[in-house]
Image (spheres, rainbow, N blue to C red):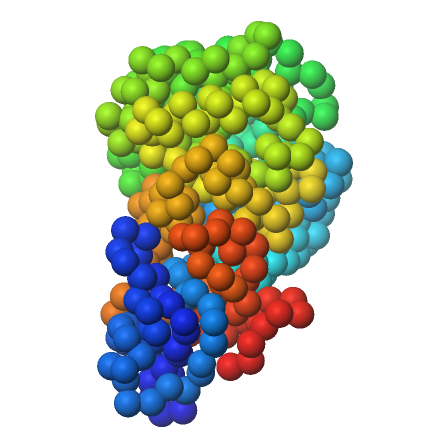
């Protein structure tokens, strides 16, 4: 855009925000990396780039990723087995792959050391999704995520860990409030079904983090860890599976309380749900539980847990198809991937919608996502900060 002149981009329809009506025959003016105006094509004297029969939506968001992972079966290896340089390259590569899939912002909730922050703060040299960081998760000795986390077994250690994150510039604190289902070093057994920290310890984590200006995301697999994290005041609840033996059962009273409070839940829906299944319940039960959370009014946000085996950035849209499978309103699906996700991760001022003065993070989909959720997998064009990035084999030049 020589001389800062507006680039006017037109499309069959434009959705500026999930809760607003689509603009038919819409157009967006971009200059200096920002949206300058948006409206009907007829509002603009000329169009520079006509994308044709596509829908432009705000850049999508993945609220739960692990960028340093290769999404292979060895997830969970010790950092010593993966040099920092290799991990940095994976972070950059995965952030680039997300962008080509239409995901313009990701929140990384677990990376060895401060490597995600290192990439966030430097020009990676390739177009990449914006990274919101938590860096090392806070866990216990031998606990979930210990291979990449900070082990804390006392209140002073927890305070020190939170302060260390503040010193390194972490955007968020990630705490493993419970055990998990992925730990190749040793079986976690009953840790999946109980909290890893006491109520006092969880309160210390949240209080210390909030005092230092950092929100808290809590990995919660079982009911007690969900309630403990919720009462402590964490800002997002991750997974929220209500895992139990023989299978997960939603505590409707607790879920309704979370819904009334408006606390976002990132259920980490991904390609597992409709293909290989999930470990906490049979597929039909897991889907019914997720539907119950939605029916109770829980604010669900898109996040794939990218980093698990096969959960590659290119499969982001398959998580949104899980929301479609449970009958979620398609406007709510779009919000879960854009405006609601932006609000949940603290980026609502710069992501999640299209409007004047906001970064020009735009995605063009073949089809209408409000009519067919499969449109999310048909990314035809991406713009990040005013720079066009064509997805593999499908891009429209700019």
Is there any visible trace of residue 191 in the rendered image? yes
* Residue 186 placement: quadrant: top right
Q: Residue at x 56, y 55 (%)?
A: 377
Horizontal side of 181 relative to 32 (left or right) equals right
For the point 64% across and 47% down, the residue is 312
Residue 223 falls in image quadrant: top left
Image height check: is 2 above or below 171? Answer: below
Percent coordinates x, y for residue 336 in the rendering = 39, 44
Q: Residue 5 appears at what percent x and percent y?
A: 34, 88
State the residue in front, 130 or 81: 130
Q: Residue furthest front?
A: 371
Can you say which quadrant of the picture contains the N terminus?
A: bottom left
Whether residue 292 is situated above or below residue 276 in the rendered picture: above
Give left or right: position of 73 versus 342.
Answer: right
> Farthest residue toward the bottom?
3
Residue plotted at (35% across, 15% down): 252
- x then y, percent, for residue 318: 57, 44
Residue at left 33%, top 89%? 46
In the figure, 343 relative to 21: above or below?
above
Is residue 119 at all visible to an observer of this figure? no
The percent coordinates of residue 383 (x first, y second) are 46, 70
Reply above or below: 284 against 54: above
């Amino acid at each position: 855009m020589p001389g800062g002149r507006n680039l006017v981009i037109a499309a069959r329809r434009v959705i500026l925000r999930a809760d607003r009506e689509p603009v038919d025959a819409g157009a967006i003016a971009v200059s200096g990396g920002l949206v300058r105006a948006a409206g009907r094509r007829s509002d603009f004297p000329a169009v520079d780039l006509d994308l044709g029969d596509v829908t432009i939506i705000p850049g999508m968001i993945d609220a739960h990723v692990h960028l340093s992972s290769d999404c292979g079966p060895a997830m969970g290896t010790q950092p010593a087995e993966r040099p920092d340089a290799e991990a940095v390259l994976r972070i950059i590569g995965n952030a680039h792959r997300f962008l080509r899939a239409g995901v313009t912002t990701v929140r990384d909730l677990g990376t060895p050391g401060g490597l995600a922050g290192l990439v966030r703060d430097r020009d990676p040299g390739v177009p990449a999704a914006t990274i919101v960081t938590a860096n090392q998760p806070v866990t216990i000795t031998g606990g979930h995520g210990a291979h990449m986390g900070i082990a804390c077994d006392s209140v002073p250690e927890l305070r020190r860990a939170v302060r260390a994150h503040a010193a390194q510039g972490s955007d968020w604190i990630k705490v493993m409030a419970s055990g998990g289902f992925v730990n190749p070093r040793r079986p976690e057994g009953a840790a999946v079904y109980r909290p890893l920290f006491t109520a006092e310890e969880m309160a210390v984590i949240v209080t210390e983090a909030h005092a230092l200006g950092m929100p808290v995301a809590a990995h919660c697999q079982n009911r007690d860890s969900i309630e403990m994290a919720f009462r402590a005041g964490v800002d997002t609840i991750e997974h929220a599976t209500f895992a139990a033996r023989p299978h997960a059962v939603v505590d409707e009273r607790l879920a309704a309380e979370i819904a009334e409070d408006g606390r976002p839940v990132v259920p980490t829906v991904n390609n597992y749900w409709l293909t290989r299944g999930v470990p906490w319940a049979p597929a039909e039960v897991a889907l019914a539980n997720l539907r119950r959370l939605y029916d109770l009014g829980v604010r669900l946000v898109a996040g794939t847990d990218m980093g698990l085996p096969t959960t590659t950035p290119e499969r982001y849209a398959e998580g949104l198809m899980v929301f479609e499978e449970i009958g979620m309103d398609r406007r709510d699906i779009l919000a879960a991937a854009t405006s609601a996700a932006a609000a949940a991760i603290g980026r609502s001022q710069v992501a999640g919608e299209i409007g004047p003065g906001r970064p020009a993070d735009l995605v063009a989909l073949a089809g209408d996502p409000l009519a067919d959720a499969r449109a999310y997998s048909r990314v035809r064009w991406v713009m990040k900060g005013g720079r066009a990035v064509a997805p593999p084999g499908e891009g429209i030049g700019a």
